[in-house]
Image (cartoon, rainbow, N blue to C red):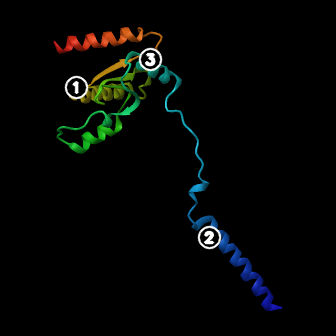
Amino acid sequence: MQPIWIWVVSGIVLVLLVLLYLKFIRAPSPRDDRYTSEALVTPAQADLLYYLQTAFPGQAVLANVPLNKIVSIRRAANRRRAHEALDTMRVNFAVCDNGGKASYVFDVEAYRKGDASVAQRDAMEKNRILKSAGVRLIYIKDTTRSMPPPDEFRLKLSLAALSRSE
């Protein structure tokens, strides 16, 4: 009778070890992973994106662009700090010229978050970086209702760029 209990207990221990192995030790299969889609832009951003695409026909208009994709570092006293600054900043929209470089970048005023003094300091730093690269940063409202028609908006930006270059 004693050997049967040894076999039963050994079998139970073996089954438990196999279950523990399957549950904790074995690498999970990537086939078990599940994903869900996320919104790339909010409805308000989609309206602004469409507005900018209408204002700049034939030009690429991108949303939520990291600053390190728009500018690169030519010279810096502390290169690591400069890279960190570029890695943490982004603009809401960028309009590209035919060469793929950003000619205008737009930030939506309503999307600034957090402490006002920190937001102002970050905005000044972002503007300084973009200005040194020759890219114009323009703040726009979070809705197209208060904006001029897209053709008029493009014309105003072109006229402002001409007056700055004179």
In three-dimensional space, the C-alpha distance between marks 2 and 3, rounded to whole angstroms, equals 56 Å
Which residue is depicted at the point 41% across and 19% down?
A: 52
Q: Is residue 59 above or below residue 35?
A: above
What's the amino acid at mark 1?
Gly
Q: Which residue is mark 2?
A: 21
Residue 1 locus on image (x, y percent): 83, 91
Whether tag 2 and tag 3 are in contact, CB under 8 A, the answer is: no
Q: Residue furthest right?
A: 1
In three-dimensional space, the C-alpha distance between marks 1 and 3, rounded to whole angstroms, equals 24 Å
Q: Secondary structure at mark 1?
A: loop
What's the amino acid at mark 2?
Tyr
What label does residue 51 carry, if any?
3
Which quadrant holds residue 58?
top left
Which residue is depicted at the point 58% across and 67% down?
A: 26
| Mark toward the viewer: 2 or 3 | 3
Residue 132 locus on image (x, y percent): 21, 28
Q: Nearer the viewer, residue 45 or 1?
A: 45
Q: Secondary structure at mark 2?
A: helix
Of callouts 1 and 3, the N-terminal one: 3
Density class for disc 2 (Cα within 10 Å; few <14, some 14-19, many ≥20) is few
Which residue is depicted at the point 37% across and 18% down?
A: 56
Q: Secondary structure at mark 3?
A: helix
Q: Is residue 51 above or below residue 69?
A: above
Q: Which residue is mark 1?
A: 134
What's the amino acid at mark 3?
Tyr
Residue 28 locus on image (x, y percent): 58, 60
Of callouts 1 and 2, the N-terminal one: 2
